Image (cartoon, grey):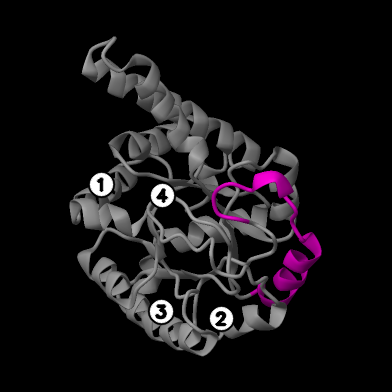
Amino acid sequence: MASTMKENRALPILVHARKNKYGVPSMCCYNTEGILATVRAAEAKSSPAMILLFPWAIQYAGGLLVHLAAEAARGSSVPVSVHLDHAQTPEIVRQAADMGGFDSIMVDMSHYEKEENLRLTTELTKYCHERGIAVEAEPGRIEGGEDGVSDTADLEGLLTTPEEAQEFVDCGIDWLAPAFGNVHGNYGPRGVQLEYERLDSIDKKVGNKVELVLHGSDPFTKEIFGKCIQHGVSKVNINKVLNAPCQKVWAEKSGKIPFTALIEEATKEMQKAVEECIVLLGSEGKAVSVL
């Protein structure tokens, strides 16, 4: 692995979380408000955090949101890193790796057949590592879709096996996002049905080589988070919990208060949501000893 990986900001954040049994709030941000809310909440609670952007951010604004997030992260008084979630083509992975600003990228080739998925993941992991960027990948397939990601709800949900997890670790990745009953977006009438034994078996197989990532966590409780963390999860992706308060403020107060006040109130409500996530994940007060 290139020596530049030693300077990576994201890797020690998750290593510390894993060792100390808490989850790092990884917030899916779409705007300035979400970025500021994440950093301010992390500082207020002395917690590490991650700012997650989707490829949509690059398609919409080029590198502007990326570099805004990077500047906010690097200016923070606590450890904060910037991650590209669900990069679903080789082209967007390379573009993101070359533009600067990202500490980690999720190489999501899960819509390809398995062999091609593994081949591309290996190739793109090397590309990212050469640029000092950590890599996350998704074995199996996590059903559903969310804003900024191609909808995979029509694809069969395939649960990760320990053997598949090992195959992806062999690609050289740093983080693994297993499918063990978790779903992107709405869980629907079936509700949350997670296979903790499957998660535990994956952790026992590869947990000493990679950090585990939880996707599809928006409706989860402290108890569910706690179980996932006990079975090896250290990075927890959160979307609606952050962004719903912003939409609520806009819906209720748009046109009724000055525009600047609307923006500020939305940011404050989003910050509250992130602070609540920090408490649920047990990361409060952990920032001082991460780096």
Q: Which of the two labelled residues, at mark 4 and mark 2, occupies the earlier sequence position?
A: 4
Q: Is residue 37 left or right of residue 22?
A: left
For the question of whether residue 70 can be seen, the reply is yes
Query: Badge 2 is on which residue?
Result: 168
Query: Could you say which is closer to the camera, residue 114 or residue 238?
Result: 114
Q: Which of the two labelled residues, at mark 4 and mark 1, occupies the earlier sequence position?
A: 1
Residue density around tag 4, few if under 14, some if 14–19, many if 20 or more, within 10 Å: few
* Residue at horizontal 37 percent and vertical 37 percent from the top: 34
Residue 267: % across, % down: 36, 27
Q: Amino acid at mark 3?
A: Thr
Q: Are marks 4 and 3 in contact (CB under 8 Å)?
A: no
Q: Amino acid at mark 2?
A: Phe
Question: Which span is picked out in magenta?
Answer: 183-208
Spatial distance from mark 3 to mark 1, Cα to Cα? 25 Å
Query: Badge 1 is on which residue?
Result: 71
Q: Are marks 1 and 2 in contact (CB under 8 Å)?
A: no
Query: Badge 3 is on which residue?
Result: 125
Q: Tell me which corner region of the image, top left, top right, bottom left or bottom right, holds residue 159.
A: bottom right
Q: Is-magenta flag for residue 195?
A: yes
Name the element at disc 2.
helix
Query: Could you say which is closer to the camera, residue 98 or residue 147?
Result: 147
Q: Which of the two labelled residues, at mark 1 and mark 2, occupies the earlier sequence position?
A: 1
Spatial distance from mark 4 to mark 1, Cα to Cα? 24 Å
Q: Which of the two labelled residues, at mark 4 and mark 3, occupies the earlier sequence position?
A: 3
Residue 179: % across, % down: 64, 66
